[in-house]
Amino acid sequence: MTTARPTGRWVIVISFLVAFLLAGVPLPGELQRFRPDWVTMVLIYWCMALPHRIGIGVGWSVGLLLDIGRGALLGQHALALAVVAYLTLQTYRRIRVAPLWQQAFSVLAFLLVEQILIFWISGVIGYPPRDWWYLAPAIGGMALWPLLFVILRDARRYFQVS
């Protein structure tokens, strides 16, 4: 029995690094409200594409890095990303066979779960958001999901990430 070693770890790491960088790029005016959560979207993609390698632990770890980078309560994003990773792992078989426009609605649901968890945690510690525009990044993420999916899928195939 031969066991193939996983390849392309660096592609996954670079995709998360690019997501962290995109999360910090300033956007003009009203577009700022719709900035998608790139890190969460990349996590969703890798959980769907490589569920045997990327999971709840990676979601938790990336979330802690996001907490540190944003100066948020330690564990806030970690919890939200771990829940999103769990939900993705539970449903990836049904989602990844769907057309991209249907996948986008699933991603919208995952991003809303993340935003609501962060909304709740912020409220518990005394920092509730000012208005409902707080959920707008989920809409931006849904709109950009097909593009992100195609880019990451092509990179995964080109570099033979397994």
Image: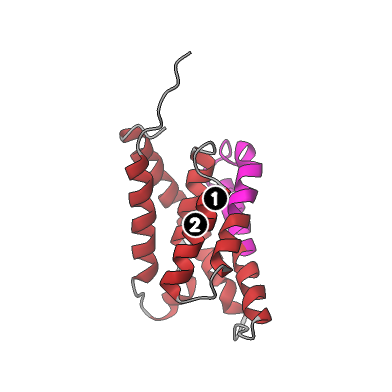
Q: Which residue is mark 1?
A: 57
Residue 152 location (% of width, % of height) = 39, 45
- Tell me if residue 34 comes above or below residue 160 in the rendering: below
The residue to which callout 2 is attached is 61
Q: Is residue 33 above or below residue 85?
A: below
Task: State which region is magenta.
Answer: 84-113
Q: Farthest residue toward the top? A: 1
Q: Report whether 36 appears left or right of 14.
A: right
Q: Camera-side residue: 126 or 150?
A: 126
- Are the residues at dot 2 and dot 1 in contact (C-beta closer than 8 Å)? yes
Residue depicted at 61% across the width and 83% down the height: 131
What amino acid is at disc 1?
Gly
Front residue of 40/26: it is 40
Tell me which secondary structure the magenta stretch mostly adopts: helix
Under tag 1, what secondary structure? helix
Residue 124 image-quadrant placement: bottom right
The one of 86 and 64 positioned closer to us in this rendering: 64
Q: Quadrant of the C terminus?
A: top left
